[in-house]
Image (cartoon, grey):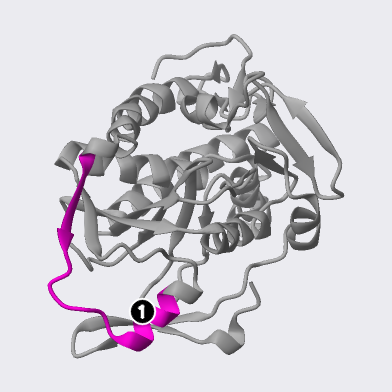
């Protein structure tokens, strides 16, 4: 990456998805924790001055990380997103066997729509790589994540002894951000990815967390899982376990109850802002803003196979 001394304002809002989140007026609803609302342009929200600026060994400013994100991460994902949103890409086949009655009732209670079909999107290796890289970047590409890294280095005795200035600490944090992203990519390489489509009138919500990832990695069968709204009508879930074929993304459809459950996860991970395309559900947002969503699902490995257990008593969604 070449050095560039010109100050820049850097985006953490996913610009390539902006057109999906804008209303007819080209604006997005932005909601604060207290429920106050304003409308903004995707070009002006999710922007922070010199967010990805780091110092070179000669003390010059290097502001090329965002350009790298745009070229190496967003550009490949642009094609992948187009593929995911193409309805003709969905392949359907009948169930080979009927699901257990109890499991079917459970899925309905969670808001999933039964179609009698097993639906998938067949993807190329390049598409899978692009989706995984984009999700990994979205986890680390936020002011909150960078601040966590900077706080770590400020409190680390080794760095404290060196009495590094804030600029140098930020540079180290940015380098570690990129390393963390690669680590996520490696862990997600064989992940199971599911695409969820909203079928009712409720829409998915986006927040300043970007994607919601349970962290730190748990010492369990599933170390983390990810929820990522892609558009107001489509979201993506990732479980870092090889539960399905790598060349297929699972497809599910949810009613308003299912969308509400997903939004509970998103709003619970918000820090400053929540974003919507349509009129925001203010009472829902205010009561759940920054409050972690319930965790009613448990995972265990039985005879080498992963089992997911749902405990409704722990579900307060």
Locate residue 106: give its quadrant.
bottom left
Q: Is residue 220 visible?
A: no
- Left or right of 246 in this view: 291: right
List x then y, in percent, for residue 211: 52, 49
List x then y, in percent, for residue 159: 61, 50
SS label for mark 1: helix
Answer whether residue 246 is magenta in the image: no
Determine which residue is flagged by label 1. 104
What segment carries the magenta color? Answer: 89-107
Locate residue 157: give its quadrant.
bottom right
For residue 284, above or below residue 296 = above
List x then y, in percent, for residue 66: 49, 24
Q: What residue lies at 35% left-to-right and 58% top-to-bottom? A: 252
Answer whether residue 91 is magenta in the image: yes
Q: Residue furthest top?
A: 6
Q: Quadrant of the C terminus?
A: bottom right
Q: Quadrant of the N terminus?
A: top left
Q: What residue lies at 49% left-to-right and 67% top-to-bottom? A: 111
For residue 254, above or below residue 280 = below
Disc tally is 1
The foreground one among 176 and 37 is 37
């Amino acid at each position: 990456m070449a050095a560039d001394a010109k100050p820049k304002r850097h985006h953490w809002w996913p610009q390539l998805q902006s057109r999906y989140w804008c209303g007819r007026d080209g604006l997005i609803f932005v909601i604060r924790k207290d429920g106050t609302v304003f409308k903004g342009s995707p070009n002006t929200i999710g922007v922070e001055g010199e967010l990805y600026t780091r110092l070179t060994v000669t003390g010059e400013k290097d502001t090329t990380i965002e350009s790298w994100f745009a070229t190496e991460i967003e550009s490949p994902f642009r094609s992948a997103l187009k593929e995911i949103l193409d309805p003709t890409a969905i392949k359907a086949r009948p169930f080979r066997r009927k699901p257990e009655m109890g499991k079917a009732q459970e899925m309905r209670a969670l808001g999933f729509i039964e179609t009698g079909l097993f639906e998938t999107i067949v993807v190329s290796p390049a598409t899978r790589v692009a989706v995984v890289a984009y999700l990994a970047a979205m986890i680390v590409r936020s002011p909150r994540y960078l601040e966590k890294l900077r706080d770590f280095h400020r409190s680390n005795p080794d760095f404290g002894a060196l009495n590094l200035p804030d600029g140098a600490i930020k540079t180290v944090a940015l380098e570690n951000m990129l390393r963390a992203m690669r680590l996520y990519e490696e862990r997600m390489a064989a992940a199971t990815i599911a695409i969820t489509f909203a079928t009712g009138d409720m829409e998915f919500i986006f927040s300043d967390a970007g994607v919601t990832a349970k962290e730190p990695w748990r010492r369990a069968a599933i170390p983390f899982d990810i929820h990522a709204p892609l558009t107001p009508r489509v979201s993506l879930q990732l479980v870092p376990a090889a539960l399905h074929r790598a060349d297929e993304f699972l497809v599910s459809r949810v009613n308003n109850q299912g969308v509400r459950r997903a939004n509970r996860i998103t709003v619970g991970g918000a820090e400053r802002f929540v974003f919507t395309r349509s009129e925001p559900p203010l009472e829902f947002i205010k009561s759940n803003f920054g409050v972690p969503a319930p965790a009613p699902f448990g995972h265990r490995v039985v005879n080498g196979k992963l089992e997911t257990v749902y405990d409704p008593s722990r579900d307060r969604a």
